[in-house]
Image (spheres, grey):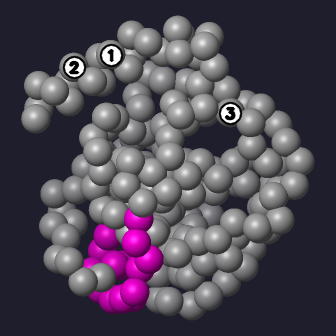
Amino acid sequence: MGDRIDVDNLGIVFYPDPVLRKTCRPVERFDENLARLVQRMFELMRAGKGIGLAAPQVGVTLRLLICNPTGEPADDMVCINPELTNLIGSEEREEGCLSLPNVSVPMRRAVQARIRAYDVTGKPYERDGTDLLARVWQHENDHLDGRMIIDSMSDSAQLANRRALKQLQAEFKQSA
C-alpha cells in the first residue's frame, strides 16, 4: 500500500473535507495493510448503517470501495481498482451518503452494470449487478473520482438540503 495508514484511528470523513474531492490512485500492493484497511472500512460502514463505502470517505486516496446491499456477511464485496462497464438503463432514486449525513438527493443511475475489479488478495474478477447493487457501485465509484451526490443536485434538492450542508460546513470549519 506504500503509505503507512493508521487503520485503527480511521473514521468517516465528512463533507466538505477536501480529501473527498481528490482523484484516487490505484492500489498497487495487496498486503496485510490493505486487508486491515478493508476490514476497518467494513466496521465503519456497518457502524454508520451504510451499504457502501469508498476509501476517500475514510481519508485514504486509493481506488478501493466496499459494499454490502443486503447486510448479510456473505455478501460483503471488496472492489479494488474497479472499472464499471455495460451501464444499461436508467432510474432515478433517492441516495444518501455516509459523508453527507441528513442529505438525500434524487440521482439518476444505470439499473445494470458490470464491475471489473480485484479482491483483497489481488485476484481479478468480473461481476454483473442490477438495481441496488449497480447503484451502490456507481455511487462509490464516483467517490474514487472526487464526485459526490451533491454535485448533481437540482434546485429543489439544493433547497431541501441547504440547512444540512450549511451545518456540515460549519462543523468542518470548527474542527479545522
The disc, 3 or 1, on the residue closer to the chain's N-terminal end is 3
Image spot of residue 79 (x, y percent): 55, 71
Residue 145 vertical position relative to residue 114 in the rendered view, above or below? above
Q: How many marks?
A: 3
Task: Judge whether 141 appears above or below 25 on screen.
Answer: above
Write down the quadrant of residue 141 in the picture.
bottom right
Residue at left offset 30%, top offset 82%: 1
- Secondary structure beneath label 2: helix
Crowding near pointer 2: few (<14 within 10 Å), some, many (20+)?
A: few
Which residue appears at 18% of the width and 63% of the height? Answer: 8
Q: Where residue 47 sits: x, y (%)?
A: 37, 45
As drawn, is 107 to the left or to the right of 6? right
Give the SS element for disc 1. helix
Query: Where is mark 3, residue-wise?
Result: 107
Foreground pick, 20 / 38: 20
Q: CA distance from mark 3 to mark 1?
A: 21 Å
76 falls in the magenta region: no
Q: Is residue 88 above or below residue 82?
A: above
| C-beta proximity under 8 Å, tags 2 and 1 | yes
Q: Amino acid at mark 3?
A: Met
Q: Indicate the position of residue 70 as horizontal and vertical percent values.
A: 64, 51
Q: Which residue is mark 2?
A: 170
Side (left or right) of 128 relative to 34: right
Dot 1 corresponds to which residue?
Answer: 166
Using the rendered image of the protein, determine whether residue 53 is visible from the camera's viewpoint.
Answer: no
26 falls in the magenta region: yes
Q: Which residues are magenta?
A: 24-37
Q: Earlier in the sequence, mark 3 or mark 2?
A: 3
